């Protein structure tokens, strides 16, 4: 490779030698499979393994993506926290369909999730907000997330003002800040393999025509 990585983008290739992924090896429940991979990402030393890309449907129809830190993954789905007045929250209020993308490059793995969002219970947002460092709590009050602001000094003045307002006692959670829950309807687990013959397993939640509970259907996709 030359000194400039940009000049080498088209020739930059890794061979993915990690173990494969096959239907008999994965959990019946895709959340259990996600939890298994998340633990393995932590064990492999992946940086911020709970960081994921959240894509929303923009109010003008443009897809919008940004990183978020995941704060919960259980039987209900995936949880994260943000400003309810932010662009992403306005987009999710208008169209509750989202995509999540987890990438653990050291393991040559990605997981794509499609789901629908709703607010978590206020008590859950209160509990998480209460666990945050005081500086982050003041920051949540100070930042009109996604809005244009005049300059950095304006933000720092707001922080100083809010620090004064909440000088005594605990910082309460702002009503405009809280959690979202993503209830997954589809997952795709991707494992990089040699010669670009990657493994892709997709779980889709399928309605029961007899009116019973929906069930996960598992399929292999071509790479
Ligand atoms: C690694 C990483 C983690 C982030 N985690 C969060 C988060 O948990 N919540 C959040 O509101 N923004 C988070 N951000 C900032 C968002 O990417 C984004 O800038 C912000 O939420 C505003 O997005 P919006 O204008 O589309 O609403 C994170 C950014 C990075 C790079």
Image (tube, helix red, strand yellow):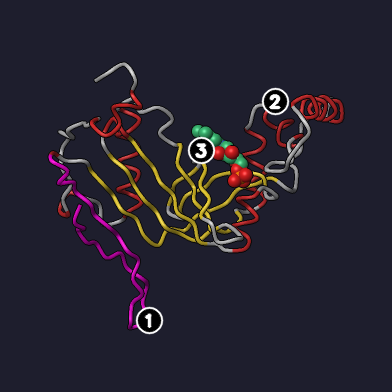
Q: Earlier in the sequence, mark 1 or mark 2?
A: 2
Give the residue number, with chain letter if any, for mark 1: 211
Q: Residue at x 63, y 54 (%)?
A: 121
Say whether mark 2 is within 8 Å of ligand 1: no
Label 1 CA crowd tier, 10 Å (few <14, some 14–19, many 20+): few
Q: Are marks 1 and 2 in contact (CB under 8 Å)?
A: no
Give ligand 1's quarter of the image: top right
Q: What label sits on residue 65 in the rendered view?
A: none
Q: Is residue 164 magenta?
A: no
Count of numbered badges drawn on the protein: 3
Segment tinted magenta in the rendering: 195-223
Tag nearer the camera, 3 or 1? 3
Task: Residue 206: say if magenta.
Answer: yes
The local crowd at label 3, few if under 14, some if 14 to 19, many if 20 or more residues have their Cα within 10 Å, is some
Tag of residue 69: 3
* Helix, strand or loop status at disc 3: strand
Tag 2 residue: 135
């Amino acid at each position: 490779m030359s000194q400039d990585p940009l000049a080498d983008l088209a020739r930059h290739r890794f061979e993915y030698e990690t173990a494969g992924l096959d239907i008999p090896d994965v959990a019946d429940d895709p959340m259990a499979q996600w939890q298994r991979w998340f633990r393995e990402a932590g064990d492999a030393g992946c940086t911020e393994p709970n960081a994921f890309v959240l894509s929303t449907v923009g109010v003008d129809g443009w897809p919008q993506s940004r990183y978020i830190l995941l704060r919960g993954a259980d039987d209900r789905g995936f949880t994260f926290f943000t400003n309810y007045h932010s662009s992403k929250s306005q987009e999710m209020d208008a169209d509750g369909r989202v995509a999540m993308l987890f990438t653990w490059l050291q393991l040559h793995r990605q997981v794509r999730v499609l789901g629908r969002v709703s607010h978590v219970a206020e008590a859950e947002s209160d509990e998480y907000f209460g666990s945050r460092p005081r500086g982050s709590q003041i920051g949540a009050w100070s930042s009109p997330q996604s809005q244009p602001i005049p300059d950095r000094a304006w933000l720092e003045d707001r922080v100083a003002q809010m620090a004064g307002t909440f000088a005594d006692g605990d910082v309460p959670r702002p009503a405009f800040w809280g959690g979202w829950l993503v209830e997954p309807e589809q997952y795709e687990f991707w494992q990089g393999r040699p010669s670009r013959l990657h493994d892709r397993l997709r779980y889709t939640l399928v309605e029961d025509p007899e009116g019973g509970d929906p069930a996960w259907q598992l399929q292999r996709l071509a790479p």
